[in-house]
Amino acid sequence: MELLALKENIKKLRELKGYTQEQMADKLNGIKLRTYQDIENSRTRDISFTELQQIAEILEINTSQLVGFNEKLVFNNCKAEGNNSFNCSNFTIHSAEKLYERLILEKDKRIESLEKQVENLHKTIEKLAQ
């Protein structure tokens, strides 16, 4: 993930939680406000994994959710319903977490299916080799 996108995620999630930059700085072991502002805004300052973990903990999410945050899933999920009409439902962070979990489960099932295909191919190759 691009560093600037990650920093945007941090800022958006902080705002969704209703925290100010000052509050985040205090919660991050009392770092200086300017240091926290650099975490969100600086194009040159990297974010350490430890900082990322602490920020995720403060925002009450895990690091993968912080990295994979997509504001479109939080604010709107619209589906076309014929004749150019849309059904939109607001998502919460909880809904985004459920979607993330479902995607992970689908990925795991796909991996399992591919592993079975590979196993079957190995068996077929062994039979042909005999």
Image (cartoon, rainbow, N blue to C red):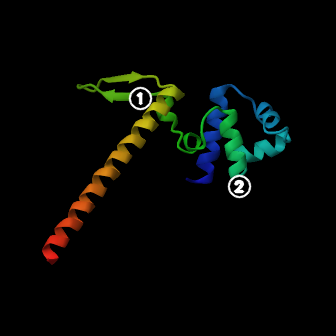
In the rendered view of the protein, which quadrant contains the C terminus?
Answer: bottom left
Indicate the position of residue 86 as horizontal and vertical percent values.
Answer: 33, 24
Q: Residue furthest bottom?
A: 129
Residue at 82% over, 34% down: 26
User: Circles 2 and 1: CB distance less than 8 Å?
Assistant: no
Disc 1 is placed on an element classified as strand
The answer to which of 23 and 27 lies nearer the viewer is 27
Query: What's under tag 2, amino acid-wise?
Result: Asp
The answer to which of 53 and 11 lies nearer the viewer is 53
Residue at 71% over, 49% down: 50
Residue at 69% over, 39% down: 55
Q: Quadrant of residue 32?
A: top right
Indicate the position of residue 27 as horizontal and vertical percent values.
Answer: 79, 34
Q: Quadrant of residue 120?
A: bottom left
Q: Is residue 64 left or right of residue 106?
A: right
Query: Can you see residue 41?
Result: no
Q: Is residue 64 left or right of residue 122?
A: right
Residue at 46% over, 38% down: 100
**Does residue 40 lie above or below 122 as drawn?**
above
Q: Earlier in the sequence, mark 2 or mark 1?
A: 2
**Does residue 37 lie above or below 23 as drawn?**
below
**Does residue 47 lie above or below 83 as drawn?**
below
Label 2: which residue?
A: 46
Q: Is residue 86 left or right of residue 50?
A: left
Disc 2 is placed on an element classified as loop
Residue at mark 2 to residue at mark 1: CA–CA distance = 32 Å
How many labels were placed on the picture? 2
Residue 77 is tagged as 1
Q: Residues within 10 Å of mark 1 (few under 14, many from 20)?
A: few
Query: What's under tag 1, amino acid-wise?
Result: Asn
